[in-house]
Image (tube, grey):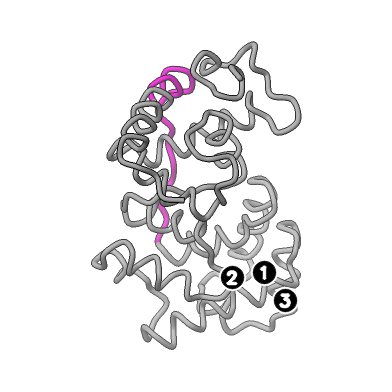
Amino acid sequence: MPINQQSITNKAQLAAEVHTRLLKEYGEPKWTKLDGVSELVGTILSQNTNDGNRDLAYARLRARFPTWEQVRDADVDKVIEAIKPAGLANQKGPRIQAALKKITQERGKLNIDFLAKMPMEEARAWLTSINGVGEKTAAIVLLFCYDMPAFPVDTHVHRVTGRLGLRDEKMSADDTHRLMEQLCPPGAEGAFHLNLIRHGRAVCQARLPMCERCVLADICAFNNR
């Protein structure tokens, strides 16, 4: 269902207030900027697992295969074994290799920095044409590698934005990406995204949200219904 402009304006004001409060609560988050291919592989590894398992799998992969060309050309069973800590290795190993092969075939080398010169929607479409790369993975690469105003929506962001009333309760995560790109204060995408995740993990948890200690409680639709 289309959202009217007045609703967008109201929700954008709410989003700005949420962002301001989360900054006060958690501070300005920092992150390490990777090249696009490294971020893409790391984000595929992160699917359906936690950050610790992803980081361990990524470190093991890089230790055994120092270049992405070596990962691309390796025996798939060796890639699968290296990334086992991330879970779903039998899916992620072939998926990573297929992505690296597609990049090589289309670009001649393992580099996706060309995306920085494309309009965001074209860059997003190119990334999501890779099997196993969805809206969230594409948004992470575009935001954190190429400073585009994409807004990644993971399970925490989807849950918190729904409870706050920033999105319709039935809106899918994929549709929430586009909505949050409209609502987010310009230039705040990285900080807002990461602080929403932190808040979802620390306070606005899935089963037992701790509304009594939430800095957003007074403006939260879930807490005030």
Q: Position of residue 96 (x, y in %)?
A: 59, 73
Above/below status of 216 relative to 99: above
Do residues under tags 2 and 1 come within 8 Å of each other at their CB atoms?
yes
Say which label, 2 or 1, has the lower sequence index.
1
* Residue 82 within the magenta-colored segment of the rendering: no
Foreground disc of the pair 3, 2: 2
Give how far apart the Cα atoms at labels 2 and 1 are. 8 Å
Q: Give the residue pinned by disc 1.
A: 92
Q: Position of residue 40 (x, y in %)?
A: 50, 63
Indicate the secondary structure of the residue bearing disc 1: helix
Say which label, 3 or 2, has the lower sequence index.
3
- The mark found on residue 132 in the picture is 2
Q: Report the quarter where the C terminus lies.
A: top right
The residue shown at (64%, 32%) is: 201
Front position in the image: 34 or 92: 92
Give how far apart the Cα atoms at labels 1 and 3 are. 12 Å
Q: Is residue 193 left or right of residue 61?
A: left
Q: Specify the segment rendered in magenta.
A: 20-35
Q: Position of residue 154 (x, y in %)?
A: 57, 47
The amino acid on which the numbered mark 3 sits, given as a three-letter code, is: Lys
Foreground disc of the pair 1, 3: 1
The amino acid on which the numbered mark 2 sits, given as a three-letter code, is: Gly
Do residues under tags 1 and 3 come within 8 Å of each other at their CB atoms?
no
The residue shown at (37%, 41%) is: 189
Q: Give the residue pinned by disc 3.
A: 78
Front position in the image: 76 or 219: 219
